[in-house]
Amino acid sequence: MGRSTLRRVALVMGVLNVTPDSFSDGGHHPTVDAAVAHGLAMAEQGADWVDVGGESTRPGAAPVAEAEELRRVVPVVERLAGAGVRVSVDTRKPGVARAAAAAGAGMLNDVSASLHEVAAELGLAWVAMHAQGDPRTMQDDPHYDDVVAEVRDHLLACAERGRAAGVTEVWIDPGIGFGKTLEHNLALLAHLPELVAAGHPVLLGASRKWFLGRLLADSDRVGAPVPVDDRLEGSLATATWAFACGVQMVRVHDVRAIGHAASVVAGEIEGVAA
């Protein structure tokens, strides 16, 4: 498979939602063949991981039965892994994690930050993400006394639990947009260097999220948030900031563009070092 060979400052994870209701690509890949084709395309564009999810965790989303999530996810994971793609599974369910691992997934992207024992059992890399509340209600009235300190401390405690359980590769994710206001998201982005300095590799998922739509609307002096498919500038800006802060992986929809941005940043860093 002809993947990008450009040097990059961080890894790029491509988003592949096999759901009807995810906020950006929900319903875009209604069949296994369509989902696999998109996953292969992202790998060709330079995705280091393709993150397959069968349950939307956008604000207001309802939970999905395990049988349905398995039906959506496992065939896609199996075919992508069989084609040599490094696959992550985005799930909160132990049963789905186990089935995805058996199908070839190598990473567990865990919005609930609770499946460390499952990741250890299966030998998977584990991403512990911070979220305040359940997807159905998390954006109703999120509150923190100190969002940066509370998110950092929570993630470090999760990482310690993961290490104690036997997970050998633990990632932490501040959970942009998961039980956070615009101001909370911006504070977490501003303090990314502190999270990176905590010692665990950091994954950031800010691609196309609603707060970028709001910021771009303010920039364009329009009332409504900019639509999801018109947020590339915001996604590029946050990813580039993440690279500059030392974030080790970004989870994105626009793989080619973000990968090229990572290459540019890597070249700039090398130029300064030289």
Image: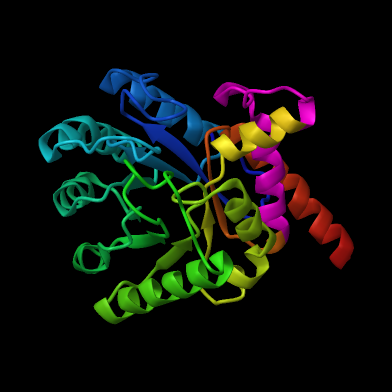
Asked which quadrant contains residue 36, the reply is top left
Q: Is residue 1 visible?
A: no
Residue 30 visible from this viewpoint = yes
User: What residue sits 63% from the left and 43% below the top?
Assistant: 5
Q: Magenta part mainly helix, strand or loop?
A: helix
Q: How is the image coloured?
A: rainbow
- Tell me what residue is drawn at x 21 percent, y 62 percent: 122
Q: Is residue 178 left or right of residue 249?
A: left
Q: Is residue 231 magenta?
A: yes
Horizontal and vertical percent for residue 157?
Answer: 39, 77
Residue occupying image coordinates x 45% and y 37%: 15
Q: Nearer the viewer, residue 83 or 61?
A: 61
Q: Residue furthest left?
A: 67
Q: Is residue 212 above or below residue 173?
A: above
Q: Is residue 131 above or below residue 151?
A: above
Q: Magenta stretch?
A: 219-244
The residue sitting at 27% across, 32% down in the picture is: 76
The number of numbered discs placed on residues in the rendered structure image is 0
Residue 186, image x, y percentages = 65, 53
Q: Work out which quarter of the rendered image holds the C terminus and state it.
A: bottom right
Q: Is residue 87 left or right of residue 220?
A: left
Q: Is residue 127 above or below residue 33?
A: below
Residue 204 magenta-highlighted: no
Q: Where's residue 220, x and y in %?
A: 78, 25
223 vs 170, nearest the viewer? 223
**Residue lying furthest front:** 141
Q: Residue 161: which quarter of the image? A: bottom left
